[in-house]
Structure formats: C-alpha cells, structure tokens
Image: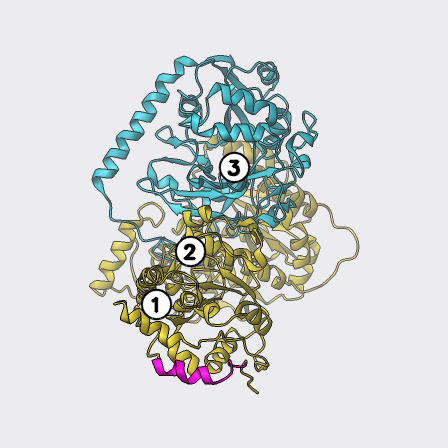
Chain colours: A cyan, B yellow
C-alpha cells in the first residue's frame, strides 16, 4: 500500500495481456457445471477418508499448505518434508493410500502433518484428486496451497534464499493467484539399478542429470491451459507414441478458494482463468520447476507392482511397455544430458523464469 | 541538532519497532503513524511495547488507502507533532515501516549537518519525467477521482474517459506548479514548517485532497514554493518493477545493499533476518563519508525489468507462450533455409559450412528422419532425430532447435519431399532467410535409375508439393527474407546469388568466396524435361530449359567449378 509509487500511475492493468478470446457463454456455462460436478464428487469422497492425526487446528492465517497423496514412500519422505519445511510450509495435509512400509506411522509422528488414510482405489478417486480437493476445500480456503507428489521437489528463482512466504506475498502484491511449474525429470547416469540411495538422502545427489530440451507447448481448449510435453521420458519411453508422453506443465501453487477444482492432476484447473499463468509476447511470467525424482533405484522394483495394480493412467494397458522398460533398469542418460547445478542454470535454459523478482 | 524520523506503518509492526528503536537509540526522535485500519488491540499493544522509549511517540491516526489523501494527512500529523515536540530537530525524514537504515545513523546526521539548508525531495514537473506508466500525468491534477483505482478500476477508467470527453478541468490554485516525485523525502525544519503553517494551507489541502496519488505531489509541489535549496533526489533507495510496484529486498540482496552506500532502503521483506540483523547493529569501524551510490543496484534491477517486459523471444515454455504473429521474432535467432541447393550442387552442405562457419544440417524435415549435421542422432538440447517426435509438433521442433543452439546460426535444407516442414511458420518468421531454387527436385529424378513411368508420377507429385510451398513463400504475409530463383535462372550465374546469401549470413563480411560448390552435370537435362512434357507432364517450376542446350553441352567437357575472385 504505502509506497506503491508514481510509476503505478496507469489506468490500465493489461501491461502484458493477451487478446482475450470472445467469451463463449455456453462453454463457460458448461465448464461451470463441470466444476460443480468435480466439487460434488470431492465432497462425497470425504467418506472414504479416515483421519489418523488431525493437527489442522494449528494452521495459522497466511500459512502455506501442502496437500499430497502417497503410497509407500518411506525412503523419500524425510527429505521431501525437510525440503518443504525449509521453504516455510506451515502444514502438510497428507492422504495415505494404503502404505505398507511404515509411511503412515512415520507421518503420524510429524508435528506439522495432518494425516488421513484410505484403502479405496486411487484411480477411481481421479488419481487421488477427489480426496485432495476435499481437503483443500475444507482447510486451504484463502491459503496458498501447494499440491505435489512425494517425489516432486519445487524450486523457483531464489528458492535458496527466499521462502514460499516471500514468493507468495510477492505474487499477492501482483494480484497473481497461480504459480506454474515445469516438471523436470531427473535421473542418474548408468543403469537405474546401479545407483545407491539412502533413506533421507537428498535425491538430487543421486539423480544429477536432466534433459535441457526439447519441450513443446501447445494451447488446449476449452480450459486454455498449456500442454507441455517432451524431455527424458519422451525420449526414452515414448519416442514412438509422442501423444502418450507425460504432461509436464503443472500449476501446483495456487491461492486456493473452496470454489476451485483441479481437473486433471494439477495440470489444469477450473475456473479456467487459473490456467492463464503464462505470458504472451514481451513477457516472462514467473514460473518454477518441479524436480521429478521418480527415477531412484527403487523404481525398478516398484514399477512391477504398479503394473499389476493398474492404478495409474486413464488407460493402464497402454502403458504396460513403460513399466516393462523401467523394470529392465535402462540407462536414461544421453550425450546431451546436463548435470543439474542450480536454479540459475534452469533459468538460463528457459525452463523457469524469475519474472523480474 | 538532530534528524527526526517520521514513520508510516501499517504491517509488520515488530519490524517497525525494531527500526524505530534503532533510530531512537542513536538519538533521532521518531514519530510513528499507524494506519487506522490496524485493529485497536494490535495498536495498543504496539504503543505499549514502545512506551519505554521517550524518543518514540505516536501521532493521530488516519485511514490510509493507496493513492488517497490519507497518507498525506498522516505525514502532516506526524510532521506537526515532530516539529512541536522536538525543538532541536533540524531535518525531518519521512520513511515507512519497511524502510531500513543501511548506514550508521551518525553518518546520516553528519551528512545532513553538513548541508543544513538543503531539502532532499525528488520533485519534477509532470512534463519532464517519463515515470508514469502509460496513464495519467498532468491529469492527476486536473481531473477528479471519486473512485478507487484499486477497488473500482472500471469506474475509475470510465470516469477519466468521461471527463476527458467533456473536457472537464479543475483549476490549479494560484502560486503553485504541480511537481511529482518519490514520496520519501527529507526536509529542513524551515521548509516543512513553512508548508504546514502556510496561511493558504486550507486552499492547498482542499485542492490536493482531490488529486490522484497526492502523497507523490503534495510536498513535492509545495517544497518548490518555500525551499531555497532543493536537491531533487530521494535519500531513500527504492526501486520499481515493471508494474510500478516497489521491488522488495531479500536476504540475498545483503551485499548489494551494503555496496550501495545509500542511507535508507525500502522495501525490506519483513522476514529478511540477515538484512535486519546485519544493518541494525551498532556501528563499528571507521565512519566513511561517501556519497550514496545506487548505480550498481540500478543496473541489476533494470536488467530484471527489461527481462520481465521484453521476455525472451523465441522461448516457448510453461510460462511463456506467445500467440502466433504477436511477436517480432517467432524464434530465438536467425537461421537460413535452403531449398533445392543440395540437388544442384554435389557438395553443397560441406561447402556452405566452410564458407560461412555455421552449422549446416541436411533435410531436417525429411520423411525418414531429421538429418542433423554429420548424421548425429541427438542434437543440442537433447533434440532427437525421430521423425515421429518431430512431426508431432514440427513448429516446436524448429523453435526448440533454434533456442537450444543459441549463439550459433543454423542452416538446413528443405525440399518438396519434406511435407511435414512448417513452411508457413518459417515464412512468417522474420528470423528466417529462405533461398529457393525452384524445380531443382527434378535433378535427382533425372539422375535416378527409376522407370520412366514412376519418374513421371513422382515428378508430378513433387511439382504439386513445391508449388504449394512457393505459394506460402510468395504470400503477402511472408515476413522472412525470401529469395526465389527458377533453376534455369539460377544456373545462368550461380555465384552472384550465392555471394549475396553468404554476405547476408554475414559471419565474415570481408571474405569473398574462394571456392565454389561443385555443380552437378546437367548434360541432357533439357531433353529429360522434354521427355516429361512429351509424356503429358509439364514441368514448369524450373523455368525455360532449351532442349538444344543439351546438345551444345554434350560437346563441351563437364563444367568445372566456378572460381570467382
């Protein structure tokens, strides 16, 4: 307030606006009902959750929250939680989907974790989205809320010196409610099974490499989100079926409202304006990177189980080859792989933007 | 003699207290104004916690909204209290709760004591400065603004439009010339008291109450009336981003702030422990009397602003996706496309690489695979030669290639066989240089060992494809540098066009071509075309190739490479 200065003396706010498409009222109306449908599903899904530890009374105004669904992630959890604690997260809202490796007991002990559990189908709950949307609806209204998986580490410009509170309050100042991130697969050099990872270790010490490109983006109707694909998983597993290659754009960090709903993981959301976190010409909207640390050595054993469970992907049968190939412990490294150094490196490569911050 | 600090506070009260104590401990009286919107309870607690210090006092509270009179009223009340209660105050420094002194307070005192008659207030006439972002400058003083810019933007804008339409104008009171500048000033007791005790103050206040963002013009304008010596700059370091919002300083700016030698900086992020810890210590070591030097910070922030507003053209990513045609460069940098050259010259690619020092690929959009330079399978940025991936999004393939090979010009071949090539995209891209020899596709057919019926069929297909591509290249929408020759035209004098293309690529403008690429032997080509015609397929894209030429050429030995001095 004080000191938003002279230089704000403008009467229009569209400094970097794209031309807005003609409002299609019918499409907007349909999307509104779609959103309500999603919220209703999520509201119904609350019966599937059993509270294990409820520390939600400790949530303070202005806290940044993390919501997460997981299954058997005991080796990663200590580091993931530590990473987000360092970034100033106030509380973790976690759904445990039938872990058998002690994740539940571990999480129940953490002072900043509220834990629910369920044994219901992950896939039937829209890959956990129904559960998480319910938790967000109930606890995250008007909070900045981060939806990530246990194997995703969010980084952004200056993340080493400025925490999420600084980031979100800056975004608030700009009137921006969403912060997008690019999912970047990181992997070891050499066959997957050769790497060594100790529980609690920083996965980035093991997974030091990533693909600097190519990433392609296209705009998708009717939600207006970008669809970014490419990178290592496409190069290795989906070169013949680029259409099936994983979606890499996410909007994990949102100033949440109980009226919001994610549509497809956190790749896109409703209302559609949440998907417009990108800039047109003459602009570089701020965005971050989600380091996707899926390819730890344990994935080799896990992928066989996942193949049997058929809980991922809309058409699981089409992805059998993906699990088979991972189970064969391939070497994901290529001549053009880069070694991960810092966020500055990622920004120079055009994978994230500081957006003038 | 000392400096009095006025502090306008609305959040992060604990930090404000910390800073206020720092000033007060160094002997500077502090008057704090707390926004009326802060709840009574919080305010009382704040007052109580500061009550042990006699140099910290609180003034009457006003409700402050950005761009409104409240902030000026707050400064007035605080200033009046300061002048009244602390008689030995010589300079009065206006600051906010998120301001932080960067240098020992004694240095500021000495600096001001050495300039007892100087008012430090940024103050410029509206006509002279480009600060205002795209909107109102002089009209701030001549229009009325009953609607809040922050809350009712639409009404605000419309009301401005209506007033402009009916040519409404307020009259500016006599004796003042509107000036604007940063609202963080440091005035002498003399100037400030003259402003506050002016017999006409009623008139001025009434006028400025209806001005937009008066905190940036009230004191700035009136100081011009009374001050004998204005130094038009603010002692407070503050930077603005592209939206006109102040930049916030975080812990990683610590070294930068130290080197700036500024007295006070804003805004500081309230949780920046290192900054607060580092600067609010009692002074140590020798006191230096250097001038503030914000230039270094200026450069760094100017860079950030430029990046934010201009973006990085040619980059398509998660948070940057220009509409097609909205940007001057649709790709990151310049590249060259050659059409029909490899068919005509036997060693065109290695020759071009030698002549220009650029990276020369084959047919990137060949149906079989992307022919990267030297048969590489994966190029910079892990770009794969897989045709499937490429054809899935051919435009992204190109933008990725150009982005990932930044700093090195790329050349590649395109021909009618490369149906997947995004010809429309390329010809609309001002970064592209396209050179076409039309009809050259017939040469490989001419040299091939296929049955004539198949040749005829393939020729018809390629001619159709190429004529479609040429249509795009000749369209009025093409923004690329396009040159098109027919085959017949080109072989008349091949070196001239080649030299022009190479010059334009311009890696070494002084270099003349020392060697020419080896042109393939075209003896009998005219007859070949005639045979096609005789079969009912009319090749026209290569221009006029006389049948007789073939006869003439057969007598001559095969052409030698051209040499041009």
Camera-side mark, 1 or 2: 1
> Callout 1: helix, strand or loop?
helix
Q: Are marks 3 and 2 in contact (CB under 8 Å)?
A: no
- The main secondary structure of the magenta stretch is helix
**Residue that protrudes farthest toward the bottom in the picture:** B565
**x and y percentages locating residue B490 in the rendered image:** 41, 79
The answer to whether B131 is drawn above or below residue B504 in the figure is above
Quadrant, the N terminus of chain B: bottom right
> Callout 2: helix, strand or loop?
helix
Q: Which residue is mark 1?
A: B473
Q: Return the residue nearer the eye: B267 or B504.
A: B504
Q: Chain of mark 3?
A: A
Q: Is residue A222 left or right of residue A352?
A: left
The residue at 36%/56% (across/down) is B324
Q: Are marks 1 and 3 in contact (CB under 8 Å)?
A: no
> Callout 3: helix, strand or loop?
helix
The answer to whether A197 is drawn above or below residue B55 in the figure is above
The residue at 67%/39% (across/down) is A189
Residue A12 appears in the picture as rendered: yes
Residue B193 appears in the picture as rendered: no
Q: Is residue A29 left or right of residue A338?
A: left
Q: Which residue is mark 2?
A: A8
The CA distance from mark 3 to mark 2 is 49 Å
**x and y percentages locating residue A91 in the rendered image:** 54, 25
The CA distance from mark 1 to mark 2 is 44 Å
Range drawn in magenta:
B547-560
The answer to whether A150 is drawn above or below residue B481 in the figure is above
**x and y percentages locating residue B418 in the rendered image:** 40, 58
The answer to whether B207 is drawn above or below residue B249 in the figure is below
Label 2, residues with CA under 10 Å away: few <14, some 14-19, many ≥20: many
For residue A175: magenta? no
Q: Are marks 1 and 2 in one subunit?
A: no
């Amino acid at each position: 307030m004080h000191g938003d200065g002279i230089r704000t003396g403008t009467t229009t706010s569209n400094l970097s606006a794209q031309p807005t498409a003609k409002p299609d009222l019918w499409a907007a109306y349909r999307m509104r009902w779609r959103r309500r449908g999603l919220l209703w599903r999520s509201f119904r899904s609350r019966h599937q959750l059993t509270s294990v530890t409820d520390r939600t009374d400790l949530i303070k105004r202005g806290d940044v929250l993390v919501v997460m669904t997981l299954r058997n992630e005991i080796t990663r959890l200590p580091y993931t939680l530590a990473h987000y604690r360092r970034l100033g997260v106030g509380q973790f809202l976690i759904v445990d989907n039938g872990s058998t490796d002690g994740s539940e007991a571990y999480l129940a002990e953490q002072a900043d974790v509220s834990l629910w559990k369920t044994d219901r189908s992950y896939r039937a709950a829209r890959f956990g989205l129904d559960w998480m949307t319910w938790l967000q609806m109930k606890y995250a209204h008007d909070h900045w809320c981060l939806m990530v998986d246990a194997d995703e580490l969010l980084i952004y410009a200056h993340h080493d010196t400025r925490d999420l509170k600084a980031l979100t309050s800056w975004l608030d100042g700009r009137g921006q409610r969403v912060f997008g991130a690019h999912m970047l697969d990181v992997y070891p050099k050499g066959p997957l099974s050769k790497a060594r990872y100790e529980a609690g270790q920083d996965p980035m010490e093991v997974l030091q490499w990533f693909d600097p490109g190519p990433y392609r983006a296209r705009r998708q109707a009717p939600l207006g989100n970008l669809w970014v694909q490419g990178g290592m998983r496409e190069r290795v597993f989906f070169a013949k079926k680029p259409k099936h290659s994983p979606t890499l754009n996410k909007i994990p960090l949102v100033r949440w409202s109980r009226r919001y709903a994610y549509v497809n993981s956190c790749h896109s959301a409703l209302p559609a304006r949440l998907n417009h976190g990108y800039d047109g010409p003459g602009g570089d909207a701020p965005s971050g990177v989600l380091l996707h640390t899926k390819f730890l050595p344990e994935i080799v054993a896990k992928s066989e189980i996942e193949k049997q469970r058929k809980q991922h992907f809309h058409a699981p049968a089409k992805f059998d080859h993906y699990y088979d190939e991972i189970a064969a412990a391939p070497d994901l490294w290529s001549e053009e792989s880069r070694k991960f150094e810092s966020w500055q490196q990622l920004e120079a490569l055009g994978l994230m933007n500081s957006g003038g911050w | 003699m000392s400096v009095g600090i006025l502090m306008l506070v609305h959040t992060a009260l604990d930090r404000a207290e910390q800073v206020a104590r720092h000033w007060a401990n160094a002997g500077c009286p502090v008057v704090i104004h707390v926004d009326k919107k802060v709840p009574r309870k919080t305010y009382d607690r704040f007052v109580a916690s500061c009550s042990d210090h006699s140099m910290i006092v609180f003034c009457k509270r006003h409700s402050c909204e950005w761009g409104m009179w409240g902030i000026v009223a707050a400064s007035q009340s605080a200033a009046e209290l300061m002048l009244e209660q602390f008689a030995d105050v010589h300079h009065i420094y206006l600051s906010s709760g998120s301001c932080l002194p960067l240098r020992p307070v004694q240095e500021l005192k000495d600096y001001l004591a050495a300039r007892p008659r100087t008012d430090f207030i940024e103050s410029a006439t509206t006509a002279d400065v480009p600060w205002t972002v795209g909107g109102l400058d002089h009209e701030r003083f001549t229009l009325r603004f009953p609607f809040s810019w922050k809350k009712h933007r639409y009404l605000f804008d419309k009301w401005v439009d209506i007033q402009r339409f009916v040519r409404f104008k307020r009259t500016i009171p006599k004796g003042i010339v509107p000036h604007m500048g940063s609202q963080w000033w440091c005035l002498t007791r003399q100037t400030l008291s003259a402003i506050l005790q002016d017999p006409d103050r009623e008139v001025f206040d009434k006028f400025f109450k209806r001005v937009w963002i008066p905190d940036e013009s009230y004191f700035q304008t009136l100081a011009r009336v009374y001050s004998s010596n204005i130094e038009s700059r603010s002692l407070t370091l503050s930077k603005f981003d592209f939206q006109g919002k102040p930049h916030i300083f975080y812990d990683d700016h610590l070294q930068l702030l130290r080197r700036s030698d500024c007295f006070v900086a804003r805004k500081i992020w309230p949780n920046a422990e290192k900054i607060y810890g580092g600067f609010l210590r009692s002074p140590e070591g020798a006191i230096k009397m250097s001038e503030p030097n914000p230039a270094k910070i200026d450069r760094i922030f100017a860079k950030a602003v430029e990046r934010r507003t201009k973006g990085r053209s040619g980059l398509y990513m998660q948070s940057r996706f220009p509409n097609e045609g909205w940007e001057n460069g649709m790709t990151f940098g310049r590249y060259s496309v050659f059409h029909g050259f490899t068919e005509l010259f036997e060693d065109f690619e290695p020759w071009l690489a030698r002549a220009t020092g650029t990276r020369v690929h084959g047919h990137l959009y060949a149906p079989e695979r992307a022919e990267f330079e030297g048969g590489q399978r994966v190029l910079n940025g892990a770009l794969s030669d897989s045709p499937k991936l490429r054809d899935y999004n051919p435009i992204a393939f190109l933008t990725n290639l150009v982005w990932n090979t930044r700093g090195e010009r790329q050349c590649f071949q395109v021909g009618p066989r490369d149906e997947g090539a995004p010809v429309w995209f390329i010809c609309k891209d001002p970064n592209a240089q396209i050179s076409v020899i039309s009809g050259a596709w017939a040469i490989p057919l001419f040299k091939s060992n296929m049955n004539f019926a198949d040749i005829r069929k393939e020729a018809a297909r390629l001619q159709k494809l190429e004529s479609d591509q040429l249509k795009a290249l000749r369209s009025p929408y093409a923004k690329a540098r396009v040159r098109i020759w027919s085959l017949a035209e080109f072989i008349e004098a091949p070196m001239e066009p080649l030299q022009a293309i190479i010059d334009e690529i311009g890696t070494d403008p002084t270099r003349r071509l020392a060697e020419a690429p080896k042109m393939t032997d075209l003896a009998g080509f005219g007859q070949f075309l005639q045979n096609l015609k005789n079969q009912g397929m009319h090749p026209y894209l290569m221009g006029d190739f006389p049948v007789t030429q073939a006869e003439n050429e057969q007598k001559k030995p095969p052409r030698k490479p051209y040499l041009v001095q």
